[in-house]
Image (cartoon, helix red, strand yellow):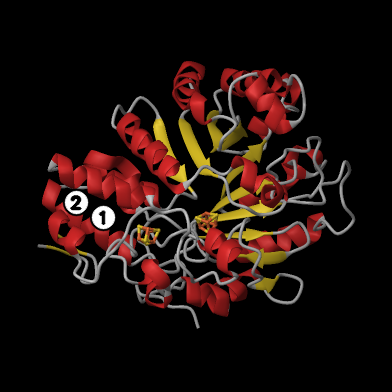
Amino acid sequence: MSRHPSGGHPGGGHPGTIKDEYGKMKSMADGDAAEHSHKYMMNSGSSLRLVFWETTAGCNLECIHCRRLDVSKQLMKNDLTFEQSCKMIDSIAKLGKVILVLSGGEPLFRPDIFEIAKYAKSVGLIVALATNGTMVDKKMARKIVDSGVQRVSISLDGIGEVHDGFRKLPGSYDRAVQGIKNLQELGMDTQINCTIAKHNVDQVEDIYQNAINLGVKALHIFMLVPVGCGVQIAEDQMLDADKYEEVLGWFYEVSKEKKIETKATCAPHYFRIMRQKAAEEGIEVTPKTHGMAAMTKGCLAGSAICFVSHEGKVFPCGYLPVEAGNIHKQEFKEVWDASEVFAKLRNVELLKGKCGICDYKTVCEGCRARAFYEKNDYMEEEPYCTYQPTDDMTSAKIMGFDFDKGEQK
Ligand code: SF4
Ligand code: SF4
């Protein structure tokens, strides 16, 4: 059974979306905001925020780090039909004001993608689109805007040829940048998603400046997860734990500039680093000081997010290949509420190894997919974290926070 610590409607326990709550907390006094944001996070055990849906396995690119091994140059016959898609969307909508991210493959490959977006919006979901951007000419940008999509994320894995090399298509960087501009001209919110690995780690400063110069709303950096094609390149491309620590530390520093919305994704220990650095600076982590990062935790797989594959299988995230259910056999809501895989992921007490004894486990949790890749057990310790926890909760004491009780000392 899944846990619903907030007691109310499963998945609907929050009084509002994370953005609604963020708005409220920004106007609170510092101490109240710190306490409120921590309680919000602790109580969000099974409150669904985001569903990433692989609308099709078809794609026009063959990126070297793709989580799929079998990307197709055409739509696949086992992609969900429009009717099946709408049924799933209806069930997701029962869980509240959820963000539905239309991804792929390449979602713009689907001719009915705009009808799907309109339908999802009509039943109350917030619709976002994750695309490689290369198909977003002016006409396509207009269709995206008219369909009610509220934000478009475009993957840029480096500058110029570095991105093209990763995406295995010369010119794909220029086309993606043009796609961003075409969308911005029509007033669309845009976001850059960037996987940081060996190929582009020397460009991180440029990537950050480029995002600012392009005028996107947000820059989300991703740590490579060894899954799909990523397994084959993991050895060559994965940064070691020390280098990730350095990059995440740098990201914390630039995030303080508040020039752009920043988020470290699939790098759960960022939330540990953020708290360690804030403690060194003598500041409290609150929505006022650290934005929405103060209200969320590292790995959200199965507790706030999940992934639906193009053929209807439900997973904790797109990188953790442990099936939690199948929408051809169950309603989506039933999978979310009752999956044993999700129940396990929502219980940090079941974490093993150093994550199990870590004082930051409630705000971090480690990447369950990297644990699965290394140890074939998704509750094992995160292999790319340098932190060595002890049983005495030293860091939590330094930080003045008792994470077990969720109380400020
Ligand atoms: S398991 Fe968590 S941190 Fe790892 S890839 Fe999935 S959502 Fe990201
Ligand atoms: S040991 Fe695990 S829970 Fe602790 S900070 Fe590292 S990854 Fe996170």
Cα separation, mark 1 vs mark 2, equals: 6 Å
- Relative placement, left or right, of 340 versus 361 is right
Q: Quadrant of residue 13?
A: bottom left
- Residue 179 in view: no
Residue at the spot of label 1: 37
Front one among 209 and 58: 209
10 Å crowding of disc 2: few (<14), some (14-19), many (20+): many
Residue shown at 13% from the left, 47% from the top? 30
Tell me if residue 170 comes above or below residue 221 in the rendering.
Answer: above
Badge 1 amino acid: Ser
Give percent across and percent down for residue 82: 80, 55
Residue at the spot of label 2: 33
Label 2 near ligand 2 (CB < 8 Å): no
- Relative placement, left or right, of 259 versus 376 is left
User: Dots 1 and 2: beta carbons under 8 Å?
Assistant: yes
User: Which quadrant would the C terminus be assigned to in this image?
Assistant: bottom left
Residue shown at 33% from the left, 55% from the top? 387
Badge 2 amino acid: Ala
